[in-house]
Image (tube, helix red, strand yellow):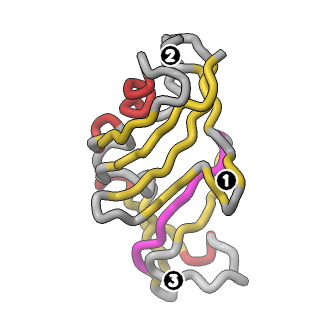
Amino acid sequence: MKVKKGDNVKVDYTGTFEDGTVFDSSTHGDHSHPLEFEAGSGRVIKGFDDAIMGMELNQEKEIKILPKEAYGDPDPSRIQKIPRDKLPKDVDIKPGMIIVMSTPQGQFPVKINEVSNKDVTLDLNHPLAGKTLIFKIKIVGIN
């Protein structure tokens, strides 16, 4: 049985950057928490969705996903300066920090680029924008 569009799949994975740094994994300690999604539904990044098509149960492979098939390139218009008082006073905000912001569309990670007494510069691009991603994947379920 090969993965086709519309199948519900379970995938074990480890995601790394080109330098080998792990940024995400479905294995935490001794426990595996496979990623479950409908193949071809667009619920995962395009490069990942495309890579699993035609794979068989228990098949493993390593894939390299360029930014255009992942989170795109950083968009300079998504870097914004806001007044410092718009962020919680009890949080020690530092450059390089990732905070979670809530919007009507849901929660998303935001990187702090610069902090002054008056302003904070936020990078609203996805933290993985502009990055080439390497995934080791294994199909552990097909329904």
Give, as a three-letter code, the residue at label 3: Lys
**SS for callout 2:** loop
* Separation (CA) of disc 3 from disc 2: 44 Å
Vertical relation: 63 (above or below) 102: above
Instruction: Return the residue at label 2.
Output: 3
Give the total number of marks visible in the rendering.
3
Estimate how packed mark 3 is, as few (under 14), some (14 to 19) or many (20 or more) residues with alpha carbons within 10 Å: some
Residue 87, relative to residue 26: is it above or below?
below
Residue at the spot 62% in from the left edge and 58% down from the top edge: 101
Residue at 57% across, 35% down: 11
Label placed on residue 102:
1
Name the front one of labels 2 and 1: 2
Residue 80: x and y in percent read 41, 62
The answer to whether one can see residue 74 in this image is: no
Is residue 33 in the magenta section?
no
Residue 39 in the image: above or below residue 14: above
Which sits in the foreground, 85 or 18?
18
Q: Circle 1 sits in a helix, a strand or a loop, which is it? A: strand
Residue at which label 3 appears: 94
Task: Give the mark nearer the N terminus: 3 vs 2.
Answer: 2
Residue at left 29%, top 50%? 132
- Which secondary structure dominates the residues rendered in magenta? strand
Residue 103, horizontal then vertical, whole percent: 65, 48
Q: Residue at left 51%, top 75%?
A: 97
- The stretch of residues the image draws in magenta is 105-114
- Nearer the observer: mark 3 or 2; the answer is 2
The amino acid type, in three-letter code, at marker 2 is Val
Q: Earlier in the sequence, mark 2 or mark 1?
A: 2
